[in-house]
Image (tube, rainbow, N blue to C red):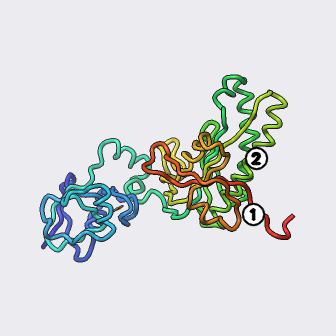
Amino acid sequence: MPEVFVWPDEVSVPLVEGGTLLAMAVDAGLPIAHLCGGRARCSTCRIRVVEGLDALSNRTEKEALMAERLDFPDEVRLACQTRADGVVRFWRLVLDKVDIEMASQLGGAHYVGPVGREVERAAVMFTDVAGFTSMSEALPAYDVVHILNRFFNRVEAAVQSEGGRVDNYMGDGLLAVFGIEREGNAPLGAVRAGLGVLEIAADINNYVSMIYGRAFQVRVGISLGEVIFGLMGGEASARETVVGDVVNTASRLEAANKTTGTKILVSEGIQTETLDSVEYGRKFKLELSGKAGQITAYEVNGLVELPGRD
Ligand code: FES
């Protein structure tokens, strides 16, 4: 009877007609990673075939895209996309000692299996305090915490009122995400929250200049795209968070305000989806650090005044 032989486990699995190599390995209890759940959205189920290449199905369209992106040679396949009609021998992605320890700490199958869910259209907002380093140098640390907490407390309420959630605080920076539960209009919610952040910052600025004689200004970057929302981190600190290129873009847009002289910059995706409700100003072609090519960004001026609105 045809079989599939898997290294480094040295386990022989009966070939299941029409089944994927991933399903056969998982059914046999092998710890083969498959973090996207078998949808050709990662490459963690990759295998290196050492015998039986001719017995394998052709690459699916999705696998071919991943193979091109990661420059796979012919013998490297995604197990979740590959079927066989004859004897096959392969190495699965080897879990090293660290992976195995993490797997047992985070719940075995959880680590090798899907780790989160994809959200195709999340709006991500980054905020940062301008000149924070010099403010931290000049003021006592307790006073800095006091100012930031005043600010963050109100920003969190503004984010929530627009259907978002604060995902993380990083010193003076804040990351918020809209659309995780596919609720409401995520791009518009993010822009409205961004404008709210500027209003809050203006208020805090009055307070900080009166008490400390310093300015308090904030920059905002917003981008739209796909994220993975799931449990990440080490055993003691694992928490739900978002990861995706859109997070980097939002962060880079926030920083780009320094060179464009703006307060809020949004990506083209956000601009396109909020044209009816948001007044946009200047358009920029930006080269963002760490990102290839140029991206188009727009300055937000405010919300469109609707007839009848006070
Ligand atoms: S499990 Fe992600 S590509 Fe196969």
Instruction: Locate the C terminus and report the quarter of the image it occupies.
Output: bottom right
Q: CA distance from mark 2 to mark 1?
A: 24 Å
Q: Between residues 192 and 82, which one lies in front from this camera angle?
A: 192
In this image, 239 relative to 132: left or right?
left
In the picture, the disc for residue 114 is: none
Q: Is residue 28 visible?
A: no
Question: Is the residue marked by circle 2 packed among few (<14), some (14-19), or many (20+) residues within 10 Å?
Answer: some
Q: Are marks 2 and 1 in contact (CB under 8 Å)?
A: no
Whole-percent x and y of residue 151? 74, 41
Q: Nearer the viewer, residue 295 or 49?
A: 295
> In the image, is 293 to the left or to the right of 71?
right
Q: Residue at x 18, y 65 (%)?
A: 4
State the residue position of label 2: 154
Q: Which mark is residue 304?
A: 1
- Going by the numbered disc 2, the residue's amino acid type is Arg
Of marks 2 and 1, the one in the foreground: 1
> Hey, which quadrant is residue 33 in on the image?
bottom left
- Percent across and percent down for residue 75 are 18, 59
N-terminal of the pair, mark 2 or mark 1, is 2
- Apparent side of residue 42 relative to residue 262 in the rendered image (left or right): left
